[in-house]
Amino acid sequence: MKEKICVLGLGYIGLPTAAMFASNGYDIVGVDVNKNVIEALNEGEIIIEEPYLDVMVREVVASGKLKAYNKPQIADVYIIAVPTPINEDKTADMSYVISATKSIVPLVKKGDIIILESTSPPGTTENIIMPILEESKLNVAEDLYVAHSPERVIPGKILFELVENNRIVGGINEESTKKVKKLYQAFVKGEIYTTNATTAEMCKLTENTFRDVNIAFANELAIICEEMGINVWDVIKYSNKHPRVNIHSPGPGVGGHCIAVDPWFIVEKYPDMAKLINLSRHTNDNMPEYVFGKSKRILGSLKDKKVTILGITYKPDVDDMRESPIIELISLLEDISGITISIYDPYVKNYKYLEKDVYTACKDSDLVILGVNHKVFNEIDMKKLYDNMGQANLLDTRNFYIEDELREIGFNYNLLGKGK
Ligand code: SAJ
């Protein structure tokens, strides 16, 4: 008999996980506090965009394997996949994890499995989840199996990566780790590595912090190379020919709900020790401001100018705008008096300044900023775009264009990380 699973939180991680277990024959109850999510799901619909997820959800809802509710239902396994957003003061907001855990206290029974999937500060499983579960009057360490098993999937490839990626499971004891590993083996084809709960929590944070620190290094190089009058993209390209060097790419900042957030969870716990991590976060957070400054330098002044932005999502080829650094850039531009802002992003359906057509967006523009390198931007007729602009200034923050081609058309081409 397969266990019945209750998944709390039907967002970017909870929903694909629920659908994946359901399509492997498990009975799943999905729980969310958002009425729209539940109503849509019970009709077989989803309200987030993720390739193939709609098809999978439609199938498992139609077959009765996945049902959504607004409150947890009795089950054998509870997977907590609620958000852990960041507070104003850069500490983790654990209120959703706490209330989700509290909501299952009246339901848990001896032998149940409780898994925290939400990315959380180190110590959460032992210091937050376990004490709440104690309120059930069960002996948590003996009667329940509790573990942290972080997801590592990348938006846009979630279903593929859920199956193929290696996974970590960290239990509060060996029995918990074993049980949870066995459960995920239902669909995970990658290796499942086992450890303790706090190590698993720290691994998840470390992976994203690794990216953040490396991106900060690339961004710092970009600023230095610009000052030096050379091209950072060449420096990185040639340095990466060394067999043991792999420098990341600079850009207008780091977005998304992981890399820009997770390092803070380490800083929060060890503020005096996490110096490099803290500095890297600040370096990356400062990039929209740097791009803003470069835009000002290109035009002399942004006052009364028209600026067009191509791409506002946090990374290419997705519709996801969470923590997008381009949104921060837009808010800096908005403070300039008399400025006109227009945006073209075929992935985004609803946002201010959005134009449906790229040439209209660039009409009479003084500066085009490439914010995100969506592949579809290759289809833009750059000559036509040039003809539409007022002054043909272009700022490429992603090393997307071929400089010589744009210069030949007549553009004043500027590249983030390249000095004059
Ligand atoms: N970026 C750069 N330079 C780079 C690489 C990325 O500026 O060299 C920027 C991107 O433009 C973007 C941001 O960083 O704004 C993050 O993008 P990403 O595609 O690298 O990562 P995410 O946030 O979509 O997903 C990450 C992944 N983590 C790692 O690669 C270590 C994913 O595997 C995690 O599951 C996910 O975070 C998560 O949920 O934690």
Image: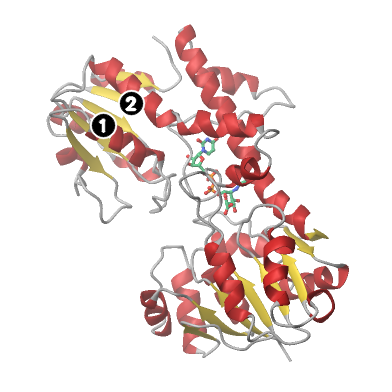
Residue drawn where x is 61% and y is 32% of the image: 214
Secondary structure beneath disc 1?
A: helix
Residue 51: numbered disc = none
Residue drawn where x is 38% and y is 46% of the image: 313
Residue drawn where x is 61% and y is 59% of the image: 161
Q: Residues within 10 Å of mark 1 (few under 14, many from 20)?
A: many
User: In this orientation, which residue lies closer to the viewer: 399 or 49?
Assistant: 49
Q: Is mark 2 within 8 Å of ligand 1?
A: no
Q: Quadrant of the N terminus?
A: bottom right
Is residue 400 at least partly visible in the picture? no
Is residue 299 at least partly visible in the picture? yes
Identify whether 1 is placed above or below 155: below
Identify whether 419 is placed above or below 250: above
Describe residue 331's horizontal placement relative to residue 84 as left or right.
Answer: left
Q: Quadrant of the C terminus?
A: top left
Position of residue 39 measured from the top left corner of the image (x, y, whole percent): 37, 81
Quarter residue 176 falls in: bottom right
Describe residue 166's horizontal placement relative to residue 336 as left or right.
Answer: right
Quarter residue 242 falls in: top right
Mark before the other along the chain sequence, 2 or 1: 2
Q: Which residue is mark 2?
A: 292
* Alpha carbon distance from label 2 to label 1: 7 Å
Position of residue 6 measured from the top left corner of the image (x, y, whole percent): 60, 81
Identify whether 50 is placed above or below 207: below
Amino acid found under the numbered disc labelled 2: Phe
Determine contact: label 2, label 1, CB under 8 Å: yes
User: In this orientation, which residue lies closer to the viewer: 12 or 161?
Assistant: 12
Secondary structure beneath disc 2?
A: helix
Identify whether 171 is placed above or below 361: below
Q: Dividing the image into four equal quarters, which quarter contains ligand 1?
A: top right
Q: Which residue is mark 1?
A: 333
Amino acid found under the numbered disc labelled 1: Leu
